[in-house]
Image: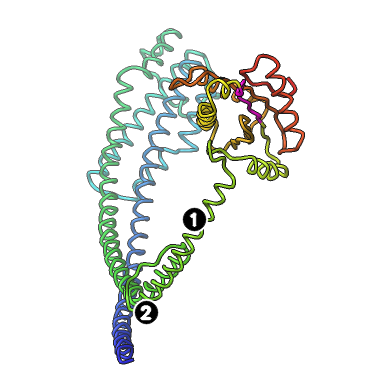
């Protein structure tokens, strides 16, 4: 009794310590949670700043691409006009240049993000060169319109106001066409385009450099905030884990060991206090007795259902499995297997050799049939097999198995005599019924009357 009281006092003192430790850990958890909330709000603000910078960066690239696309569109319309001489391309050109104005709108939009002396110079140069290039394009269209004899009032005002040089007015219509095409496809035109794109690229580099600076700065602050979050989360996890460890070690672990072993029906580890050891020993003693009883029961059941010589299921198991399959819906095949002229083997070589042949046949059946197939020895030299999940389209599979077994038996080992199997088989689309055995037996009779050493299917 003194020992029990002493243990209880120790446990009570330990509970006090656990409660104090848990109180400290809970206070630390609340403090860290408050810090985490503050850092999370700060992180959210930084994320908003980064999101704004990223959107600006994407918008800048979008506007720059729009400038290039619009410029290329104008070039394409002029080239199509000088090549195909279709006035609709002139209309599309000036609709873009005067109405849609994607290039000008995009350039104005770029200026609102960032202005710098060097960046402004590049942008102004791109605009200036672009305007000069437009004059060249309008001049080329003027040449084509003059060569084709279009009336002035049918043409846009820009083409009407464009004045051809005196030497060009003296050219033949074909020469005017050739010069217009040359102006739109020669190296000078391509060089002018590349200069415009180059200035625009330099401007974009200046703008993007400024935007990237904002983005990188925001990312650094955001990264620091995330790092603080991670540190605080780790500390909170450590504190919470410490609380869980304290509870688990002194309260939950002994109970979990017992519950787990009972649930898994396994022996309990003999550890811990005297009472727990005693409970474990009593439980383990009961478990060992139950296990021994179950093993003996399984052994007896195996002996009752299996043929002692071959290890195959016996006639009693055959009857049980047939009964189980009567209410099943799966397709199956029933095979009745007979050893050809087995009586002569027993008469000529003795029953010992006959037993060896039966065991050899059982081994071959196990080898060539699947683990889920049911194999039986239902008489002296009579075997049976029930194959589930098989249909008449798989007749060749069964024939091949029987053929392979017969080939093995035709080449015996260790001086045993040659034997063969005759098999009668029948298929069922849904489960087992008593007619199947009669039909398989009729197929077996046909096989024995027509040469033996093979497999015959009922209905063939």
Residue occupying image coordinates x 53% and y 53%: 298
Residue 301 lies, with reference to residue 269, above or below; the image says: above
Viewer can see residue 221: yes
Label 2 sits on residue: 275
What is the secondary structure assignment of the residue under circle 1?
Answer: helix
| Of labels 2 and 1, the one closer to you | 1
Residue occupying image coordinates x 36% and y 39%: 64
Q: Position of residue 239 (x, y in %)?
A: 30, 73
In the displayed structure, does residue 64 sit left or right of residue 407? left
Q: Magenta stretch: residue 67 in it?
A: no
Residue 345 lies, with reference to residue 49, above or below; the image says: above
Number of residues whose C-alpha sits closer than 10 Å to that of mark 2, classed few (under 14), some (14–19) or many (20 or more): few
Of label 2 and label 1, which has the lower sequence position? 2
Viewer can see residue 91: no
Q: Magenta stretch: residue 340 in it?
A: yes
User: Observer-nearest residue: 417 or 189?
Assistant: 417
Q: Position of residue 344 (x, y in %)?
A: 60, 20
Q: How many marks?
A: 2
Label 1 sits on residue: 295
User: Observer-nearest residue: 385 or 221?
Assistant: 385
First to last magenta residue range? 335-343
Q: Position of residue 290 (x, y in %)?
A: 49, 63
Q: How is the image coloured?
A: rainbow
Residue occupying image coordinates x 38% and y 37%: 65
What is the secondary structure assignment of the residue under circle 2?
Answer: helix
Residue lying furthest left: 118
Residue 206 lies, with reference to residue 220, above or below; the image says: above
């Amino acid at each position: 009794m003194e020992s029990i009281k002493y243990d209880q006092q120790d446990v009570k003192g330990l509970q006090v310590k656990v409660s104090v430790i848990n109180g400290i850990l809970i206070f630390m958890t609340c403090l860290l949670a408050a810090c985490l909330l503050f850092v999370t709000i700060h992180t959210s603000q930084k994320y908003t700043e980064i999101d704004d910078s990223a959107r600006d960066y994407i918008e800048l690239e979008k506007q720059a691409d729009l400038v290039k696309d619009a410029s290329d569109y104008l070039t394409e319309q002029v080239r199509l006009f000088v090549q195909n001489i279709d006035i609709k391309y002139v209309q599309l050109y000036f609709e873009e240049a005067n109405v849609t104005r994607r290039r000008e709108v995009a350039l104005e939009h770029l200026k609102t993000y960032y202005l710098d002396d060097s960046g402004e110079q590049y942008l102004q140069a791109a605009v200036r060169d672009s305007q000069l290039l437009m004059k060249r394009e309008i001049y080329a269209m003027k040449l084509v319109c003059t060569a084709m004899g279009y009336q002035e009032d049918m043409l846009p005002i820009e083409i009407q106001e464009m004045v051809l040089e005196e030497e060009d007015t003296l050219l033949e219509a074909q020469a005017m066409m050739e010069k217009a095409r040359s102006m739109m496809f020669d190296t000078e035109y391509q060089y002018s385009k590349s200069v415009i794109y180059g200035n625009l690229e330099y401007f974009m580099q200046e703008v993007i450099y400024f935007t990237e600076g904002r983005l990188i700065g925001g990312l650094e602050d955001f990264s620091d905030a995330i790092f603080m979050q991670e540190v605080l989360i780790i500390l909170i996890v450590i504190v919470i884990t410490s609380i869980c460890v304290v509870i688990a070690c002194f309260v939950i672990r002994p109970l979990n060991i017992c519950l787990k072993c009972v649930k898994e029906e396994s022996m309990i580890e003999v550890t811990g206090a005297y009472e727990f050891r005693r409970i474990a020993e009593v439980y383990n003693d009961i478990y060992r007795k139950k296990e021994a009883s179950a093993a003996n029961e399984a052994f007896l059941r195996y002996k009752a259902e299996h043929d002692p010589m071959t290890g195959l299921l016996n006639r009693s198991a055959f009857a049980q499995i047939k009964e189980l399959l009567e209410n099943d819906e799966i397709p199956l095949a029933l095979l009745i297997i007979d050893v050809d002229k087995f009586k002569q083997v027993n008469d000529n070589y003795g029953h010992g050799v006959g037993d060896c042949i039966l065991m050899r046949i059982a081994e071959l059946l196990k080898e060539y049939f699947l683990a889920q197939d049911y194999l039986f020895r239902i008489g002296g030299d009579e075997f049976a097999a029930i194959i589930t999940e098989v249909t008449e389209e798989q007749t060749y599979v069964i024939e091949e198995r029987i053929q392979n077994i017969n080939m093995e038996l035709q080449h015996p080992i260790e001086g045993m005599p040659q034997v063969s199997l005759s098999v009668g088989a029948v298929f069922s689309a849904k489960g087992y019924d008593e007619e199947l055995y009669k039909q398989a037996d009729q197929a077996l009779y046909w096989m024995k009357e027509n040469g033996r050493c093979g497999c015959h299917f009922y209905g063939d």
